[in-house]
């Protein structure tokens, strides 16, 4: 049986994964990971937090979808609902969205040209 324990640390979160059936026998193993979460850099903080949540999902065997599934759960970063972005941030987001649309159009063109496969 696998048990996951989470506890606070002064600089983040400690995760212990305890497997009492390691290698299919009555051996026990404990894997300890420290996720250092520095709240001074919000972007870095959220990236590390997302990695921790992904790792916990894997440890628990929770399937979030694969690259080949029609639906896949992603952890994503975006603006808060009440956040007022700067003009530069809006311009960057527009640029990113235009690139995403361009990529989708190119993929659609590829699909239509190779429809006979």
Image (cartoon, rainbow, N blue to C red):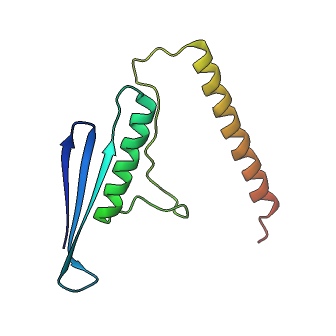
* Residue 90 located left or right of residue 45: right
Residue drawn at point x = 19 percent, y = 42 percent? 8
For the N terminus, give its image quadrant. bottom left
* Residue 60 located left or right of residue 1: right
Foreground of the two, 52 or 90: 52
Q: Is residue 79 above or below residue 15?
A: above
**Residue 51: % across, % down:** 40, 48
- Farthest residue toward the right? 113
Foreground of the two, 32 or 108: 32
Q: Is residue 91 above or below residue 18?
A: above
Q: Is residue 48 above or below residue 86?
A: below
Residue drawn at point x = 30 percent, y = 49 percent? 34
Image quadrant where residue 102 sits: top right
**Residue 41: % across, % down:** 42, 28
In this rendering, the count of numbered labels is 0
* Residue 90 located left or right of residue 80: right
**Residue 57: % across, % down:** 33, 57
Foreground of the two, 113 or 96: 96
For the C terminus, give its image quadrant. bottom right
- Farthest residue toward the bottom? 25
Residue drawn at point x = 39 percent, y = 44 percent? 50
Residue drawn at point x = 58 percent, y = 20 percent? 89
Foreground of the two, 48 or 79: 48
């Amino acid at each position: 049986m696998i048990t996951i324990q989470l506890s606070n640390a002064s600089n983040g979160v400690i995760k212990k994964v305890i497997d009492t059936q390691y290698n299919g026998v009555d051996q026990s193993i404990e894997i300890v990971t420290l996720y250092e979460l520095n709240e001074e850099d919000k972007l870095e903080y959220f990236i590390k937090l997302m990695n921790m949540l992904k790792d916990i999902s894997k440890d628990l065997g929770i399937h979030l979808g694969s690259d080949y599934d029609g639906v896949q759960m992603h952890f994503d970063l975006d603006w808060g609902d009440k956040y007022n972005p700067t003009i530069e941030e809006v311009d960057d987001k527009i640029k990113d969205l235009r690139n995403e649309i361009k990529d989708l159009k190119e993929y659609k063109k590829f699909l239509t040209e190779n429809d006979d496969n």
